[in-house]
Image (spheres, rainbow, N blue to C red):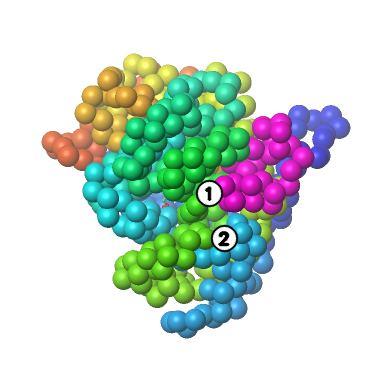
Amino acid sequence: MSKVTYYRRKPLPLEMHKVCIVQKTNIIPVEERVKAIRKAGFNTYRMESKDIYLDMLTDSGVNAMTNEQLGAMMIGDDCYAGSQTYYRLADKIKEVFNKDYFLPVHQGRACEYMLALAYVKPKPGSIVPMNFQFGTSVGKIQYCGGDYVICIKEEGLNRQSSDLFKGDFDLEKLERILKEQGDNVAFVRIESGTNLIGGQPISLDNMLATAALCKKYGVRSVLDASLLQDNLHFIKTREDKYKNSSIREIVRLISDAMDVIYFSARKLGFGRGGAIILNNIEEFEYIKTFVASFEGFPTFGGMSVKEMEAIRVGLDDTLDEDIIAQGPMFIEYFAQELEAAGIPIVTPPGGLGLHIDAMKFVPHIKRSDLPAGSLAAAIYIASGARGMERGGIDEPWANPEVEPYGAMELVRLAVPRRVYTVSQINYMVDRLTWLYDNRDLIGGIHFETEGPHQFYDALESNSDWPEKLAAKFREDFGESL
Ligand code: F0G
């Protein structure tokens, strides 16, 4: 994509695919949108897709597949044990990651459970240093009797920054932990495309240095490659040293340095499912026992063979620079347009989605009134698009003011790969610009009951602000949807 320049017009991110199959979508009137978000308890997780125009909740399992992926699904070898599909996918994994052993599981969090059972449970009280936490992985670690330690470099928590690799480890902190607690470390988790700080990449040099520290102290390195695709694009385009390396070469440099790699194939590989890959046969045999008990027979492990065939083809696409550039370039374009309108976002833009800085968008909403959740509801009312709250609802901090990792209040508008068009992004820019101009009308929300709360619980608005916002929309947009 970056190879194409324009004659006169302002460059737009250019798709290197054409659309073969489409799904109709629908915008309901603003008054109906207010009713829908009320019915969903002001929580976008609780909405029905029929009420949503652009579903920007997540990229997970909703990236568009290629015709070749759909075709490959038809040759899935459906048998309980010894499926040829398993061997075909294992060969592809060996070709891409150069690791001998592969276990399929039903999705990313199942990888995390299997790894926590294998590495954390036998060492009660052990710790897992990681660049940043992710709910599904730390949940399994804690469930298996361990805990996590965050080692992100300080700049990673700076929401507006010019640092191109905010997902990097603070290597000094990591080394201190490994030196002092080496025996008590179950593994080091390296998350590519660091999700919760805004899909921010980790540099290849930092990944290699982290893996080298693990080797020095005899600790296992485990890469969460769920968001590797975007991270590969950022290494190629932001890390000068590797600008002439192919994506395949970059993947090999990463995978040769890591002991274990796992990923959610709902993100990496454009399919659904998950994979654990490693070279150590004893560990493979041990983890296999958990896969057989909790997931399924180890040649399918909870995945459908159709999805496994699709991932095999999707992994080839993951090595294609043009294809993996699409998501990050759309997000970058989205970010530039919003910044031009003065809208506060997380910078530099990362992968997965566009992240709006709610504490700056609605500074009049106190943290206890859940600014990111309120803004996510307001965005739905203004546009019919569903984003995801990444703040005090998703992560109920006891006291956000003293929260050690900077308690972010973000709204994520995911840009699933190959799904939306530039005109739909432009529509979002327009609606967000209107909302920003009318931000004073946005009010807070609250849980109706005492905690503890789940991120999918219902909430209520603190006043009739949603109706007032919709009335202003009518005034400004007339009959428009
Ligand atoms: N690791 C990372 C970095 C993730 O982003 C996710 C999922 C997982 C692991 C778990 O994978 O969903 O297949 O079980 N992230 C999704 C999201 C849910 O919307 O960000 P899973």
- The image position of residue 475, as x and y in percent, is 45, 26
- The residue pinned by badge 1 equals 258
Name the side, left or right, on which 2 lies relative to 58.
right
Q: Which numbered disc covers residue 341?
A: none
Q: Circle 1: is it few (<14), some (14-19), or many (20+) Cα within 10 Å? A: many
Q: Which numbered disc covers residue 99?
A: 2
Which range of residues does the magenta coloring cover? 231-257
Q: Quick check: can you spot residue 461?
A: no
Name the side, left or right, on which 159 lies relative to 422.
left
The disc labelled 1 sits on which kind of residue? Met
Q: In the rendered view, would you say 69 is above or below 331?
A: below
The earlier-in-sequence mark between 1 and 2 is: 2
Q: In whole angstroms, how far apart are the C-alphas of marks 1 and 2? A: 10 Å
Q: Quadrant of residue 390?
A: top left
Viewer-nearest residue: 170 or 62: 170
Q: In the rendered view, would you say 245 is above or below 90?
A: above
